[in-house]
Image (spheres, rainbow, N blue to C red):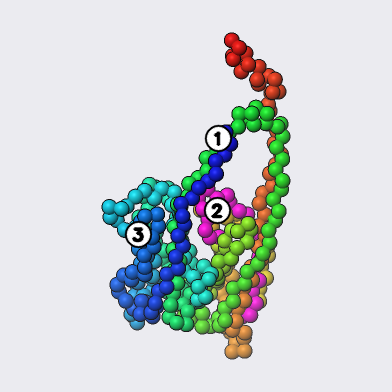
Amino acid sequence: MGGTASRSAPMTCDDLPVLWYSKLVRSRRVLNVGKVFFDGLVCNVEILPMCFDKDGLANVLIVSVGVTLDRHLRSFAGTHVSLEILDATGQHTVFHKDSDQEEDRFYRLTMYVRRCELEASSCVCASDTLTIRCTLEKKQQATKRPHLLGILFKPNAVQEPPQVAMDGSHTLTVGSFSELCAALRAEGDGIYSRHFAIGGGSRWYLKFCPKYHGRSFLCLGRGRMAKGEMPMTVEFSFDLKGVVNHQSQKMTHTFDRDNDDFFYDLEQIRITSPMQDDRLVVRCCLTVVMPEETPFAVPMRSSESVLTPLLSAMHG
């Protein structure tokens, strides 16, 4: 009468190298990066270069994973699909897109990435290679039936232990602010940090945009939020050193699937002197605090008064 253990189908996680990146961004054809085999199905990972500039370079790369539509297509209910673009070391996530499937069939997951942001965020290694990680996992949720006696003898007051605050920090370093501004030509383009873990394994990232309608901005974002995952409230601050020195006040924001990032506005940062420091170091300090449970009273009759009608019915 208790809960049953959750069971999962085997998970597959493949790192797929994209060779000759410099040729890819000049190609006008779909590149088949590789195949991922999962639960009897074959999935294709592809990249489509789009929106070419006057120099013939693609401004946008569309990364996708899709199920091969043949007679082997079967239900993908409950499948979690994830696409990641890793940094040049091939170890840390920089760009990420995932989907917890609600429909009976999964066909394609697509991620749009701007080329200049990809390169500014150090995702292309010295050997002209890009790494894409594709993860697929089919989970079966645990089912739990209530205990009858547990309901009848439920205590009158419930007090959950308070959650402990979790602290951490992460640093995003821009080696040359002037070179970054030259590489990011469009308004709103920025540099991304790798994803980092704080707060019980929750994933976060930083983005810095040097120019957007006469301003600069920082963004703190939360990644990899599964459907049904509880919102998380964070207290955080930004500390900038180098080309500009700035310390923000502490701010608070609640992150959930519909509101998963926070933008902090700055005066537009500019190089005003040849002697000015050209580096920029952004440090974000976070404190994740889960809300404390408030004791609440549950009005219940005594066990004798609850069981009396049941016993009377049994004995006629």
Compared to residue 33, the image places residue 277 above or below, namely below
What residue would you read off at disc 2? Answer: 256
Residue type beneath disc 3: Val
Q: Residue at x 36, y 70 (%)?
A: 33
Stretch of the chain drawn in magenta: 222-243
Tell me the quarter of the image containing the N terminus. top right
x and y percentages locating residue 225 in the rendered image = 53, 55
Q: Nearer the viewer, residue 91 or 123?
A: 91
Residue type beneath disc 1: Arg
Q: Residue at x 53, y 46 (%)?
A: 6
Q: Secondary structure at mark 1?
A: loop
Find out whether residue 27 is within the magenta segment: no
Q: Quadrant of residue 148?
A: top right
What residue would you read off at disc 1? Answer: 145
In-image side of 154 versus 135 (left or right): right
Tell me the quarter of the image containing the C terminus. top right
x and y percentages locating residue 126 in the rendered image = 47, 82
Compared to residue 26, the image places residue 290 above or below, namely above
Residue at the left extreme of this rendering: 71
Q: Residue at x 62, y 86 (%)?
A: 276
What residue would you read off at disc 3? Answer: 42
Between disc 2 and disc 1, the foreground one is: 1
Q: CA distance from mark 3 to mark 2?
A: 33 Å
Q: CA distance from mark 2 to mark 1?
A: 29 Å
Q: Secondary structure at mark 2?
A: loop
Q: How many marks?
A: 3
Find out whether residue 225 is within the magenta segment: yes
Residue type beneath disc 2: Asp
Q: Nearer the viewer, residue 35 or 269?
A: 35
Q: CA distance from mark 1 to mark 3?
A: 36 Å
